[in-house]
Each structure stands twice: as structure tokens, then as C-alpha cells.
Image (tube, rainbow, N blue to C red):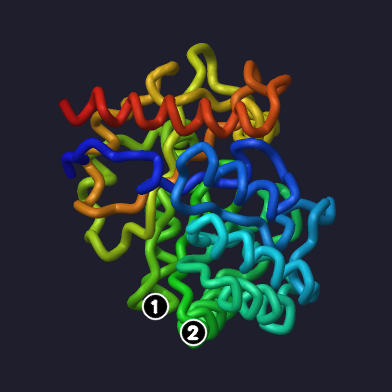
Amino acid sequence: MRQQAIPPSALVVENLTIGRMEPVRFIEEAAAAGFGAVGLPLATATPVPLEHGIVGKPATIAAIRAALQRTGTRLFDVEAFVLAPGMTMQDYRPVLEAGAELGADCISVIGAPVGGPASSPQDRIDLFGALCEEAGRHGLRVGVECMLYRDIRTIAEALLLIEAAGSDDTGIILDVLHLHRAGIDAAEIAALPPHRVAYAQLCDVAPGPAPAIAALPTEARSGRLHPGQGIAALHAFLAALPEGTALAVETPVAADAGLSTGKRLQLAADHARQFLLDWAR
């Protein structure tokens, strides 16, 4: 895929870019920075509860919907659906319902933490298949994100799960950082059937030795770089994506942490726009 010059209004910005901030404020500041869509956390991916809960809070959901309409912003993806032991559709269903009510396009599915309790392969397939089916009923596409510190580690493992569950409208979320740390190159991305790419998350990777597995979550949540500032093969990554792949900016940058959230979102938009403009030339 050769991207044309992409304005921020055609980009998604993920909530992780600035941390778990109050959703209405996030939507307003993302829109002010020029982003046209956002991603929101509706369920926690860690043992720590969400600081700003949304599910089961009608007033909060109404306020988010009003903010989306007021700013002309859309909700692109909601996270995180963790395929962890003990999870059932009763756990997922309220999150799916909230995502659908907010008009989301996609949901993000991830594996359980490596080294913790694990489901049997068949139990995980069955749970994932049921989640995909229920998401489809709510008009939500499922994306599976692989990361080395969770038990869906690679593109190959994500594909095996998707194919085993028999889900036709399910793809892989291609996060630059996680793919780089897993040693996945552009050739493997280009080999994916186009319908198996859900969307891509754009950032850059700091130079130097890769962190130990136990330190990878910290890097993912606070140690990324703006596109063009690091060592990831971003040009090859973008060229390998199917035409029309949605791009989501996910750049929690440590050097920007002391700035206001509005300034950080503006930097995220400006860096992504400039990088894509330079690449499209």
C-alpha cells in the first residue's frame, strides 16, 4: 500500500497515547488536535480497574455520545477483550453492548499474560469463537493483537486462533512496536490475506537492546516514540499494508509525559502527519 498524504482527520488516536484520561476530555482534545477518530478502553487489560469506567454508566455513555457528535469525531475501536481463563460471554457482553451503543467499529482482543493461568487451546478457541459471533451481532469487527508478553505472541499464533474459530470477519491488529519486538518483518505482513488485517497501530521504537519480556509492557505503555524518531522499518511496514488499512496512532512518549494532554495529542498528530507526508512523497 502506498498511502497518500493523510491528514490527522483520517487518523485514529488511541487513548494509550496520553494515558487513561477522562473520555469526554480525551475526545475533545483529540478533535482539537485534528484527529477524526479515537479508541477508548471499556475493559481493563490488567488487574488494575479502569480509572474512568464507562460500561454500566448510562450518563457517561450519553456524555461520550454527545462529545462525539459535538466534535464530529467517531469511535473507532474499544478495548480490551482478554482471552483469560474464567472469562465468559457474560463478562464480555456488557462491554460489547456499550461499544455498539457508542458506535464503535472494532474491538481489540488480546491473550492472557505469559506465565499466568492459561486456558486450554480448545477452551480459548471456543471462547474466542463465541466472542466473534456475539461481536458480529453487535456490528463490531474483531481485531486480534499479538504481543510477546501475552499468550497470543505472533501473527502466526493469531492466525491459527482466527482460523480455528472459523471467523470470516476477523483480522489482526498490526502494532509496530509488538511486531518489531517479535522480529516480524514486512514480508510476513505483506503475505497476510488483506481481509485478515483489521487495522494498524503506528509508532516508532527506541534504539538500543530490546527490553526483557517482563519489561515489555512498560515500554508499550510509556516508552514508544513518534514515527520517524526510532529504528522501526516504518516505510516497509506501511508499504506492506493492504490498501485502505486504517491507521491508529499509539505513541505514549516518555519525553512528552510532562506536557499537557492537549499538547501531547497535538504532537502526536503533527508527528504522524509529517511522517506520512514525507513517506508519500
Say whether residue 213 is visible: no
Q: Is residue 82 above or below residue 95?
A: above
User: At x 39% / y 78%, what residue is drawn?
Assistant: 167
Q: Nearer the viewer, residue 226 or 82?
A: 226
Q: Amino acid at mark 2?
A: Glu
Residue 13 has which mark?
none
Q: Residue at x 75, y 50 (%)?
A: 22
Question: Residue 166: x, y in percent?
Answer: 38, 79
**Tags 2 and 1 in contact by the CB under 8 Å rule?**
yes
In terms of depth relative to the viewer, which is nearer, 199 or 265? 265
Total marks in image: 2
Residue 46 placement (x, y as % from top left): 76, 51
- Residue extending farthest to the front is 70
Q: Can you identify the residue that label 1 sits on?
A: 167
What residue lies at 69% left-to-right and 22% top-to-bottom?
Answer: 259
**Secondary structure under the numbered disc 1 in the rendered image:** loop
> Could one spot residue 110 in this view of the protein?
yes
Label 2 vs 1, first from the N-terminus: 2
| Vertical position of residue 87 compared to residue 80: above or below | below
Question: Amino acid type of disc 1?
Answer: Ser
The residue depicted at 46 percent of the width and 44 percent of the height is: 35
Residue to which mark 2 is pinned: 133
Placement of the N terminus among the 4 image quadrants: top left
Q: Position of residue 174 (x, y in %)?
A: 40, 47
The quarter of the image holding the C terminus is top left
Measured in 3D between alpha carbons, the distance from the residue under mark 2 to the one under mark 1, in whole angstroms, is 8 Å
